[in-house]
Image: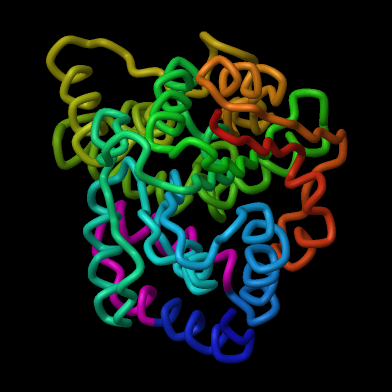
Amino acid sequence: MASTPSLLQRTRQIRDWMLANAPDGLCGEAVRAHLTGFKTDEQIDGWIALYRDAVVPAIPDFAGSVGVDFGCWSGFGTSILASFGAARVFCVEANARTMAYGKRWASQFDLDALRFAWNAGGVIPLADETVDWVYVNQVFCNMRPDGFDQAVGEISRVLKSGGRLVFCDSNNPHCSATIERLSRVYRTRELGSGDSTHPDGVIFHERVKRVRELIPAIRDESAQRLARQTCYLGGDELDRTIIVWRDHGIEPASPFLGGWQKAPVHAPTGMAAGNVTDPFDLAARFRKSGLRVSINTSATPGPSDPAELLDQISMSQSFYILGEKR
């Protein structure tokens, strides 16, 4: 395994290059927001320790293996995971622009083990039974619940027989402290330094800007309402939603505002902070898809700081599921 000092230095260099070369628009803002969790060496070292001491040991014969980091976002964390000897790790993400950016920075640092794959339409672009493991961390809490079964099915499909699933999520519906933490994270991402009347988070601001580009004559209050109601949308999906409102008057609804389960919200604004996921429900879905699974839950929230997270890996930010494909 790579030594922590050299890996820490390389990871810091990757972070700095990503920040300096992030693209304009929503993709760049999303990358910068993601990297706020890696501001200090202590935070980076916490993630290194998490992968080294918790994730990698859960995957037999990790060295030389082929795996998927499902919902990898920028792929920054994946580069740490891959450093511990995997032959290849596929960074799978729904954001095509982020995946294109990932190829750029991975090439810059000669990270041959990484491959970036856009899962258009929710499909993992890999053949059946091709990977030894799939790692999922805080992804389903940011998905539409009506897409859970497809995602579970795709994860099961690409796993080889005997392949391992390491699945972590952060929204325990029985844990009020976790919901409060998620609300804080959401405020930073979506509201930034704004207040309940004038949200001004970096990603919110970019969505308002895009609304105005597509509908130049729109009133300010309508632009802000559309930006609030398109939480977590971006790229072509965001554009289509705005155009449907412009041409047909159909109001968009955030994936996390009603319709499935009660979502945690930021009280002053009523804006969603993420979807509430249920470990028992998700474990049942994985069992149905052909995996043997065990789950661990706790009513204790996971910490925001990755360095502290290692100390509570048994709770993995509220629950984790370990699985093996039959």
Characterize the magenta stretch by its predominant secondary structure: helix
- Please determine whether, in this image, residue 245 is positioned above or below residue 167: above
Q: Residue at x 60, y 20 (%)?
A: 287
- Please determine whether, in this image, residue 263 is positioned above or below residue 22: above
Residue 26 magenta-highlighted: yes
How many numbered callouts?
A: 0
Quadrant containing the C terminus is top right
- The magenta segment is 17-38
- Please determine whether, in this image, residue 146 is positioned above or below residue 4: above
Q: Is residue 38 left or right of residue 64?
A: right
Q: Is residue 296 left or right of residue 101?
A: right
Q: Is residue 55 left or right of residue 288?
A: right
- Please determine whether, in this image, residue 26 is positioned above or below residue 290: below
Closer to us: 38 or 295: 295
Q: Residue at x 55, y 11 (%)?
A: 260
Q: Residue 3, how many percent across, how many down?
A: 61, 87
